[in-house]
Image: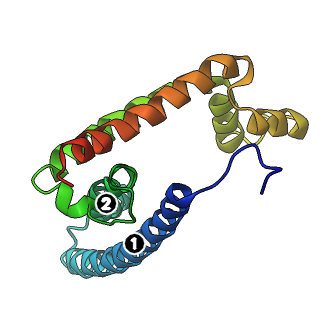
Amino acid sequence: MPWLPFRPGLDELRFVGLFFAMAGILIVLMIAAAIAMFVLTMIAGLVFGGLIAAQTAPTDSSAAWLVAGFGLLTYIPILYAMGRFAVSFPLTIKQKRFTLSGWSASKGQGWSLFFAHIVIYALALAVQVGLSWEYMSSTFLQATNPQAMIPAEQLAAQMANPFGGLMIIAAPIQAVMMLLILGPTAAIAAKAEG
């Protein structure tokens, strides 16, 4: 394809194939998490049913917090597994072949990889919330106070660019955060044999 400014080669094809393989793994893990969440919610319902019969039931809010906690617990294995499999991306580049050996390459380092990704995600989220505070506060105001009508055009403009004038700061910060997220996986791949 001579009209393209770049020539996709085998590295790019392997990377795209790995992306689809990782998407398939993620779908399987999410289905398993949904089943686990359903089972945990059913068990919680049975327990709360017993508590209601004994008239010592917790409040509705504590039940909601418990179910939310179960939901978060089901995502820990997903994040753990995807973090370990993500090592396959730099390994595919390093070994110049399609590989899903990120799991074996990150053996013994799964939890440190998990917590490194959690810290980086939390930092990225804090930066995004801080830079898009005006949009988030107006959206929260709209959701909690229906009388405070914000014009639809203003909400649409804020949704299109939640960072507003701070986009010039947000874009480079997000690029740096993406590099930081890739850092722990690349470090493990660099130490891997092969």
Viewport quadrant of the C terminus = bottom left
Task: Inspect this view and state whether residue 127 appears.
Answer: yes
Residue 193: % across, % down: 17, 52
The x, y position of residue 113, in whole percent, is 23, 45
Quarter-wise, where is residue 32 in the image? bottom left
* Residue located farthest toward the front when viewing the structure as drawn: 2
Q: Which residue lies furthest to the left in this view?
A: 108
The residue shown at (21%, 74%) is: 51
Residue 131 shows up from this direction: no
Image vertical order of residue 75 relative to residue 52, above or below: above
The quarter of the picture where the N terminus appears is bottom right
Instruction: Name the kind of residue labelled 2 in the image.
Output: Phe
Determine the image quadrant of residue 154. top right
Q: What element carries label 1?
A: helix
Q: In this view, does 87 lie above or below 152?
A: below
- Say left or right for 13 vs 69: right
| Residue picked out by circle 2 | 85
Please tell me the numbered disc located at residue 25. 1
Closer to the camera, 174 or 45? 174
Instruction: Decide if residue 188 is on the left or right side of residue 182.
Output: left
- Residue toward you, 91 or 102: 91
